[in-house]
Image (cartoon, helix red, strand yellow):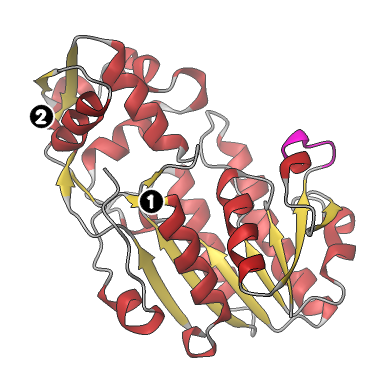
Amino acid sequence: MRILITGGAGVVGKALCRELLTRGVCVRVLSLPGDTLAKSLPPQVELFEGDVSDYMSMRPAFDGVDCVFHLAAVLLSNDVSLFEKVNVGGTRNVVSACQDAGVRRILYVSSISVTYPVLTPYGKSKLAGESFVKDSGLDWTIVRPSLVIGDGGGAEFNMFARYVLRFPVCVLPGGGKCLKRPVRSVDLVKGIACAGLCDDACGKTYALAGPEVMTMAEMAARVAASAGVRRRIVSLPWSIAKRLAVLKNWIGGEKVSAEQALAGFLYDAAPDISFAQKDLEYCPERAL
């Protein structure tokens, strides 16, 4: 069996390559031209260069493939047009390439943020991608990861951890009462691999999160404890937080919009994982 991973040179993509190789799968990766991260891919991986937002550049990578794991996406950006270009247009192109190359199976890595009551531009782009996949006529599976931790990855968590450790006092909108269910990257890739290889997972959507629900304040305390320091949590009223551009600068700077920075503090991301546990034998361990 040959699987193509779009965005396979990223942190989660590389971990997924290793996981699939241990399962005896032939792995092909689509990576951006000149991406230096591709140099650290396992030697058994077949590398194709191309951009999901440029159909002709990436189309050859789909020939002779049995299944596509579509990971390529922009997660954090102040430029909203990139979400439309890569996450929406790129997913549309990946679906078209599967159809044109005769690839029947696709696994789409979405995001738990598509379940937020108010969607950010990123969340809207991932939800649009889900629609393309569901309407493709392909044998599809969708996974929605929660906050990813470990193995050098998890851009959002890493920003949060740097923020917690930056100042002796940790200011959290709403007092950090928002609920999260972080997942270890190693558990996430096992869930992704199982979902993409399991025939019974076709036509289904799975939340992939960790076993433990915690508040943002609890998560901040654990980040501080793991670094050997203590942080006093100070609550910032939402009425003030929504007006403070400085919060965006503390957390993500130019990498993230104020809207996306605040969304993580505002909305719960603690999904039920029993469906994945039942179908995929998904058994994640504590992330923090």
Residue 44 horizontal/vertical position (percent):
79, 59
Marks 2 and 1: CB-CB under 8 Å?
no
Q: Is residue 277 above or below residue 145?
A: below
Residue highlighted by disc 1: 184
Q: Quadrant of the N terminus?
A: bottom right
Q: Quadrant of the C terminus?
A: top left
Q: Residue drawn at (30%, 39%), measured in percent from left and top?
A: 264
Residue 144 horizontal/vertical position (percent):
42, 62
Q: Residues within 10 Å of mark 2 (few under 14, many from 20)?
A: some
Q: Callout 2, which amino acid?
A: Gly
Residue highlighted by disc 2: 175
- The residue range painted magenta reads 33-37
Q: Callout 1, which amino acid?
A: Arg
Lower position in the chain sequence, tag 2 or tag 1: 2
Q: Secondary structure at mark 1?
A: strand
Q: Residue drawn at (54%, 70%), measured in percent from left and top?
A: 193
Report if residue 220 is visible in the image. Answer: yes
Residue 284 horizontal/vertical position (percent):
32, 62
